Image (cartoon, rainbow, N blue to C red):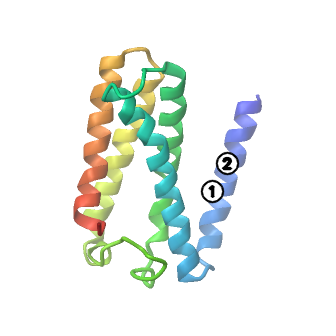
Amino acid sequence: MEKIVAWMSAVGFAFAGSVALAQQKPEDIIKYRQSALFLMGQHFGPLAAMAQGKIPYDKESAARNAAVVEYMSKLPWESFPSGTEQGNNTKAKREIWSNKDDFKAKADKMQAEVGKLAQVARGSDFDALKAQVGEAGKACKACHDEYRNK
């Protein structure tokens, strides 16, 4: 029951956050998306390290990190409205706003792959986890390569 209450609270906060996002200054919107993407990276890192053999495989840690990545993957996309193309040291390329359909397709692909990653991570098949970390990483990289400045 506690997990359900926590999850519903998180969904409520995410919804409230998206409504509030529309009323924020561009620099705050940029901070929001940077924060969501940063947290995704921080939780994806241990999964990649496990897949590469840099740290030992830990099923519970993998499942926990993958769940966070999956959840966070849903948050940043509303935070790319017009007017947030520059400022706050954003690494977002302007092509995001001129190629919105492709950007959305890449975001959708990444969300699908991290959703699969979260599912695989709940199991105990390390080889499947390793393969899905690779697929999720490719989906992230596709967007970074095209829409993120170094």
In which quadrant is the C terminus drawn?
bottom left
Residue 45 placement: quadrant: top left
| Residue 70, position as x, y percentages in the image | 47, 42
Residue 107 shown left or right of residue 8 in the figure: left
| Number of residues whose C-alpha sits closer than 10 Å to that of mark 1, classed few (under 14), some (14–19) or many (20 or more) | some
Residue type beneath disc 1: Ala
Q: Residue furthest top?
A: 124
Q: How far is mark 2 from mark 1, CA to CA?
A: 6 Å
Can the viewer see residue 116?
Answer: no
Q: Relative to the observer, which residue lies in front, 104 or 53?
A: 53
Kindly state the secondary structure of the residue where label 1 is placed.
helix
| Residue 11, position as x, y percentages in the image | 64, 49
Kindly state the secondary structure of the residue where label 2 is placed.
helix
Residue type beneath disc 2: Ala
Residue 6 placement: quadrant: top right
Above or below residue 107? Residue 114 is above
Say which residue label 1 marks.
14
In which quadrant is the N terminus drawn?
top right
